[in-house]
Image: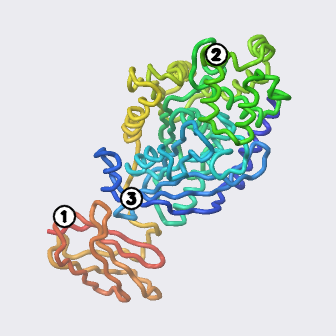
Amino acid sequence: MKKNILLLLFITLTSTLFCQKIVDVELQETLTKEELAAVFLGFSVNNGIEAYKVLYETIDTDGTIDTASGLMVLPILDSPFRQLPFLAYQHGTASNRTAVPSNMENGERILIYYFAGQGYYTTAADYLGLGESRRVIHPYVHADTEASAAIDLVKAAKTYTDQQDLLNSGQLFITGYSQGGHAGMAMHKAVNETGIDGLEVAAGSHMSGIYNMSGELLNASISEEVYLFPSYVAWIIVGYQSVYGNLYNELSDIFRPAYTPLVQSFIDGTTTRSDLNDLLIAELEKNEGASIPRFLFTDTFIASFEGDVNGPFQTALRDNNLFDWVPNAPMRMMYCTADDQVAFTNSTFTDSVMNANGAMDVLSVDVNSSADHGGCVIPAVFATNIFFEQFAKRDLVLSTKNVDQQLKFQVHPNPATDYLTLNFNNIDAGVQAYQLQLINISGQTVATQQANNLQNFTFPLNEISSGLYLMQVQSENGFWTEKILIK
């Protein structure tokens, strides 16, 4: 435990110091609002999107710097003066190393596009050991690395958007599905404890995730009931071994001889996770008559697992529990009662613990009681969007520059019809280049003028529709804005 605490401290400190570095940003795809709406079969979107693959630095469990990959999707807006929130989405269990958000063939990207299409700067980390990360084994459902990879991608995205003069509201929303439910909860907990400069969690919605690793997952791992996803259990064990190093000396210490070569081929990278699942099911059905995960393991391991609550695997599972903390921001856990992969009691149990601990706004929500794990995705995502939209701020701001009192002006006439006259009293004679913009209440610039002399400057209003506008004057030193009414 002491080793894990020191490791988490090191990751936290080094992330703060080193992990905002962007290695590469590559534009992969651009979709207009209409194209995006067509992808969603008519479901509402507010804007088009630009999708980027991002390579960025993050910290591995041994303290070394790894170059990880992820997806960043930026809304396309009519106005550069709109502040948008960030949203961090965490992806579900990958079928292979490349089945990740940064891969354009990945089907889960559509969920990430959906959130960006609502008006969020949206990120989705591939996680360590997947995508471009040099790590060999992905530490599956390992809370610390899920959190650090996601946090560092958000930091990288904020750095990039700041460089592009894209404004943000200071809000961060966190979500994810399946493994991403666990990863999103891990990220939420980490940000709750350490924060991200310039961003504050506005709300979290974690969908169909395992939060009670030492309870629900432990019981499922040694259950004698049929379970059609035995690869999940195998991946957790080899992933935790790659982090903690004490679960076994040899693979055969844990897995029976019939299954050891299959798991080893997964570790070697010659078998994908989805293929491993098929192979394990086939072998279990041949040897045991059914896909029952308990029969993967040696009798010695089962005896230790059941008899020693402080054994290495049980300890590792407890280290990755995510139910016993108190969120500072509103939080929902979206689930479906009929989920065949992740027990819904993960959400209801976590709800009860957090509320007993004094949480102010935490609730588990059954979004479709009859849906299985795959069928739960869409209702959970739509419910999450509705929940987030209660808090999201996309305010119109006037400029990326500073207010400059020397540019203060009066407008005549106001209301105006054909033209505006701008009178300035405090113009700095040393400033020669000015830009004047007429901006509507949606943040769109409808007319512009360039000027070197602003003495009694006249701004024509040819063919400008009636309504409320902002007249803004900018110089290299800042800006000043006044409201005007056009009849």
From the image, state whether disc 1 or disc 2 is nearer to you.
2
Q: Residue at the location (34% across, 46% down)?
A: 40
Residue type indicated by callout 1: Gly
Q: Residue at the location (40% across, 24% down)?
A: 371
Residue type indicated by callout 3: Leu
From the viewer's perspective, tell me whether residue 23 is left or right of residue 347.
right
Vertical side of 31 occupied by 60: above or below: above
Q: How far apart are marks 1 and 2 (CA)?
A: 64 Å
Callout count: 3
From the viewer's perspective, tell me whether residue 155 is left or right of residue 258.
left
From the viewer's perspective, tell me whether residue 155 is left or right of residue 477.
right
Vertical side of 178 occupied by 343: above or below: above
Seen as rendered, the residue at the extreme right is 249
Residue type indicated by callout 2: Asn
Secondary element at tag 3: strand
Give residue 201's position: percent from left, percent from top: 52, 42
Instruction: Find disc 1 in the rendering and name its residue.
Output: 467
Towards the viewer: 291 or 18: 291
Give residue 289's position: percent from left, percent from top: 62, 14
Q: Quadrant of residue 308?
A: top right
Disc nearer the start of the sequence (3/2):
3
